[in-house]
Image (cartoon, helix red, strand yellow):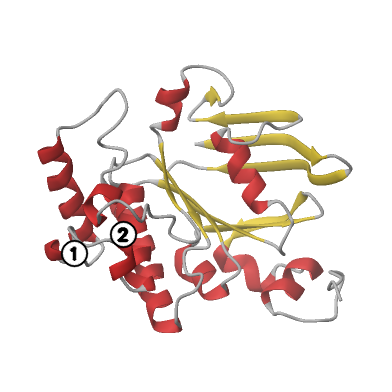
């Protein structure tokens, strides 16, 4: 579904991606891990076209991501943003239906609201939440609204950027389970960025670790703990000593 070949991106003298190669199969849940500033978010931005890579090839569903109709290309994606990124001036249902009310396949207000309420139900929120505003919700509820928005248009590919950031361990577990259930239920291809190893273990089919601008290791989740890679081993076990130097 997503094929990335020799992807490079620098910002001035700062090299962020230095030849990333990554393949994500259709219906697969790939989790990207790595330290802060290693290029995980830049990689997603390159895939969806918010950042233009310096060189390399990105193929999405068999097509060059830099060519063709932009709106049609973006219709394939849904995204759960790290901080929720809800519009505070819109009600919950309007946030969920934001995409449905715009673009070439615009739905009527009534149909969009109906779909939004159904998606809210899917993430465990009652219909009476629909007319509230984001400020009236807890952090966990806001994250669920963001998830409902990400799946509202039934995308083929869903990106999850730090899905459990700012949540307590119990709510993190709830969100991890929801993400996994929904990805499997929809048959979607998923790409998740996270530092939370409990999320990695709950969500991933495969894992890829980015370090020094390249994919240091990639493989099935079942092989992660015995990979033999010193970088991955240090990261997943949160060891201060190892080949990855901690910034002091």
Q: Residue at x 71, y 51 (%)?
A: 39
Please provide percent x and percent y for residue 205.
Answer: 50, 58
**Horizontal side, residue 36 vs residue 63: left or right:** right
Please provide percent x and percent y for residue 216.
Answer: 76, 56
Quadrant of residue 120 within the rendered picture: bottom left
Q: Mark yes or no: residue 78 visible.
A: yes
Is 6 rendered above or below residue 133? above
Is 89 rendered above or below residue 234? above
Q: Mark yes or no: residue 229 visible.
A: no
**Horizontal side, residue 243 vs residue 214: left or right:** right
The mark total stands at 2
Q: Residue at x 60, y 41 (%)?
A: 45
Circle 1 SS class: helix
**Horizontal side, residue 247 vs residue 52: left or right:** right
Q: Relative to the observer, which residue lies in front, 1 or 87? A: 87
Q: Which residue is mark 1?
A: 129
**Horizontal side, residue 169 vs residue 155: left or right:** right
- Which label is found at residue 66? none
Quadrant of residue 224 within the rendered picture: bottom right
Q: Residue at x 31, y 59 (%)?
A: 145
Q: How far apart are the two marked residues, 2 and 1, measured between alpha carbons?
A: 10 Å
Please provide percent x and percent y for residue 214.
Answer: 77, 49
Q: Quadrant of the C terminus?
A: bottom right
Q: Relative to the observer, which residue lies in front, 181 or 43? A: 43
Is 102 rendered above or below residue 173? above
> Given this view, does label 2 or label 1 mark the residue nearer the observer?
1
- Which label is found at residue 145? 2
Q: Are marks 2 and 1 in contact (CB under 8 Å)?
A: yes
Q: Residue at x 29, y 51 (%)?
A: 90
């Amino acid at each position: 579904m997503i094929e990335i070949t020799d992807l490079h991106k620098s910002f001035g003298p700062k090299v962020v991606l230095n030849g990333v190669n990554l393949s994500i199969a259709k219906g697969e849940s790939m989790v990207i891990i790595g330290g802060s500033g290693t290029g995980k978010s830049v990689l997603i931005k390159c895939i969806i076209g918010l950042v233009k890579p310096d060189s390399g090839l990105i193929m999405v569903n068999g097509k060059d991501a830099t060519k063709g109709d932009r709106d049609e290309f973006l219709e394939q994606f849904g995204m759960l943003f790290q901080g929720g990124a809800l519009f505070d001036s819109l009600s919950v249902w309007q946030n969920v239906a934001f995409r449905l009310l715009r673009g070439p396949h615009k739905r009527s207000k009534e149909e969009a609201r109906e779909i939004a309420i159904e998606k809210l139900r899917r993430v465990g929120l009652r219909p009476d939440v629909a007319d509230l505003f984001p400020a009236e919700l807890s952090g966990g509820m806001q994250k669920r609204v963001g998830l409902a928005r990400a799946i509202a248009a039934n995308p083929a590919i869903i990106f999850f950027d730090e899905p459990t950031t700012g949540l307590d361990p119990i709510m993190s577990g709830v969100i991890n389970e929801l993400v996994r259930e929904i990805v499997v239920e929809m048959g979607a291809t998923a790409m998740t960025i996270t530092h939370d190893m409990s999320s990695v273990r709950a969500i991933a089919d495969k894992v890829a670790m980015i370090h020094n601008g390249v994919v240091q290791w990639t493989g099935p989740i079942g092989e992660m703990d015995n990979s033999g890679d010193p970088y991955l081993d240090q990261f997943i076990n949160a060891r201060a000593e190892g080949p990855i130097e901690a910034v002091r």
